[in-house]
Amino acid sequence: MLNVEQFRYGTDNFAYIIYGEKQAMAIDGGAWKEILSFLKTNNLSLEFVTNTHSHYDHTSGNDHLLKATRARFLNSVALSDNHRIIIDAENVMVYRTPGHTDDSICFHAGDILITGDTLFNGTIGNCFSGNLKNFCLSIKRLMDLSDETIIYAGHDYIRDSLAFASHLEPDNKDIEIFRDSHNSNITIHSTMAEERRINPYLRFNEDAIINILKEKHLPHSTEWERWESLMSIE
């Protein structure tokens, strides 16, 4: 069974290590000093350094980690869909999830899902690629994962995302329940089950969101219209 450790750096960025008993991989390793300390304390060998996408705020720690270890760099652009990365004989699956950027990927190991800027806790990333259809397909793919899947995102946007969700659905009690239950957590995460209850971008086919689109006189007849309309709301 693999484990995950979350590291905060910058204003709101998160770096991660997925690790077993002896081996580890770093994802978006901007907190490189803290990562190296964690590796040393836990007697772990860093095998791979990689990223969820190529924006600099996620790649800034790569060179530091590679110089300080014997890790191999895995370029996110070159990793194929469903590629398997092996850590202590356990699989870490690569999912290509274009939308935020064309090269966006997620990493899935057991119940761990590292989502970068594709899926945040309570919201999703900006569509900087300009391809809303690809983004829709990527989100739908992640929605197929089990309720027990734990989402570890690339940034701590949880306060703003919950504020927007509450503004959109002021009567959604699950948003307040989630806020209260996670208010004292040091590690920022959510389960897919929680996201299905609070994240409007995972609920564009539900009556509650469709009714909001109707009230705003936005197109809502097809799944694509609902997705496009929801993405247009500010």
Image: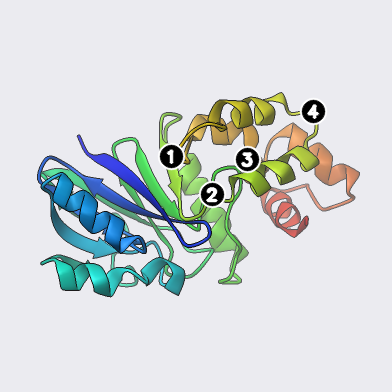
- Split into 4 quadrants, where in the image is the N terminus? top left
Q: State the residue position of label 1.
A: 187
Q: Is residue 23 above or below residue 3?
A: below
Q: Position of residue 180 (x, y in %)?
A: 61, 27
Above or below for 6 versus 9 = above
Q: Which residue is found at the position 26% from the left and 75% from the top?
A: 63
Gap in Å between the C-alphas at discs 4 and 2? 22 Å
Residue 83 shows in this picture: no
Q: Is residue 78 visible?
A: yes
Closer to the chain start, of discs 4 and 3, is 4
Among numbered discs 1 and 2, the one appearing first in the sequence: 2
Q: Which residue is mark 3?
A: 199
Q: Residue at x 50, y 41 (%)?
A: 143
Q: CA distance from mark 1 to mark 2?
A: 14 Å
| 201 over 56 or under it: above or below | above
Q: Which secondary structure lies at badge 1? A: loop
Residue that carries the numbered disc 2 in the rendered image: 120
Point 45% across, 69% down: residue:
57
Q: Which residue position is annotated with label 4?
A: 171
In the picture, residue 126 is in which quadrant? Answer: bottom right
Q: Mark 2: which amino acid? A: Phe
The Cα–Cα distance between marks 4 and 3, rounded to whole angstroms, is 14 Å
**Taking 181 as reference, is 104 left or right?**
left
Residue type at mark 1?
A: Thr
